[in-house]
Image: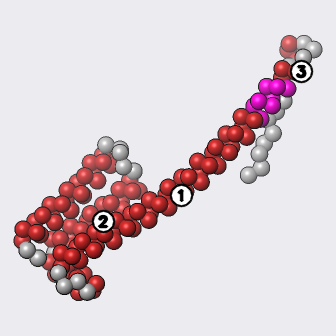
Amino acid sequence: MDPHLRVVAVVASVSLFLLVLELVRQRRLLERYALLWLGSAFALVALSAWDQLLQILANAIGASYPPSALFAAAFFFIIMLLLHFSVAVSRLADQSKMLAQRLALSEERLAGLEARERRAEPLHPDEHHPPPIPQEVP
């Protein structure tokens, strides 16, 4: 690989690595996601700095120009990260839906209890206790 291109690739990969570390330090990126990004950045640093490893990858995927293998590796890592984030977003969407349903049920129960409380007139002020909230079976 051309030395100038190698320097640019190494600087870009190391910059990505440092950016991820800074985002974790500022608590803007969770550690579990940072591990994926750090692993990807580390692999890109290794491929851009170690010419023989890049050549092995280029030969393995059939690329005649080793920097294109570096691009292919970066593209592969991005696809894997997108897949991981799609799974995480799907799980969060399911959890949000379930929480919204539970909130609606709780609000309905509360409205029913308040309506019963308004209709009921206690014999003595000390004897008025709201009925217990039924427990939900998981």
Q: How many marks?
A: 3
Q: In terms of image quadrants, where is residue 54?
A: bottom left
Residue 45 rendering spot, x and y as whole percentages: 21, 67
- Residue 120, relative to residue 24: is it above or below? above
* Residue type for callout 3: Ala
Which of the two residues, 70 or 137, is positioned nearer the viewer here?
70
* Mark 2–mark 3 distance (CA, rounded to whole Å): 65 Å
107 left or right of 75? right
Find out whether residue 115 is within the magenta segment: yes
List the residue tagged with mark 2: 40
* Mark 1–mark 2 distance (CA, rounded to whole Å): 23 Å
List the residue tagged with mark 3: 120
Q: Residues within 10 Å of mark 1 (few under 14, many from 20)?
A: few
Residue 62 rendering spot, x and y as whole percentages: 25, 86
- Residue 62, relative to residue 27: is it above or below? below
Say which mark, if any, is on residue 130: none
* Mark 1–mark 3 distance (CA, rounded to whole Å): 45 Å
Residue 81 appears in the figure: yes
Q: Tell which circle, 1 or 2, labels the residue nearer the N-terminal end.
A: 2
In the image, what residue occupies the spot 68% across and 45% down? 101
* Residue type for callout 1: Ser
Which of the two residues, 38 or 76, is positioned nearer the viewer here?
76
List the residue tagged with mark 1: 90
Principal SS element in the magenta part? helix
Dot 3 falls on a residue whose secondary structure is loop
In the image, what residue occupies the spot 44% across and 65% down? 83
Give the magenta range. 109-116
Q: Are marks 1 and 2 in contact (CB under 8 Å)?
A: no
Q: In terms of image quadrants, where is residue 103?
A: top right
Dot 1 falls on a residue whose secondary structure is helix
Q: Are marks 1 and 3 in contact (CB under 8 Å)?
A: no
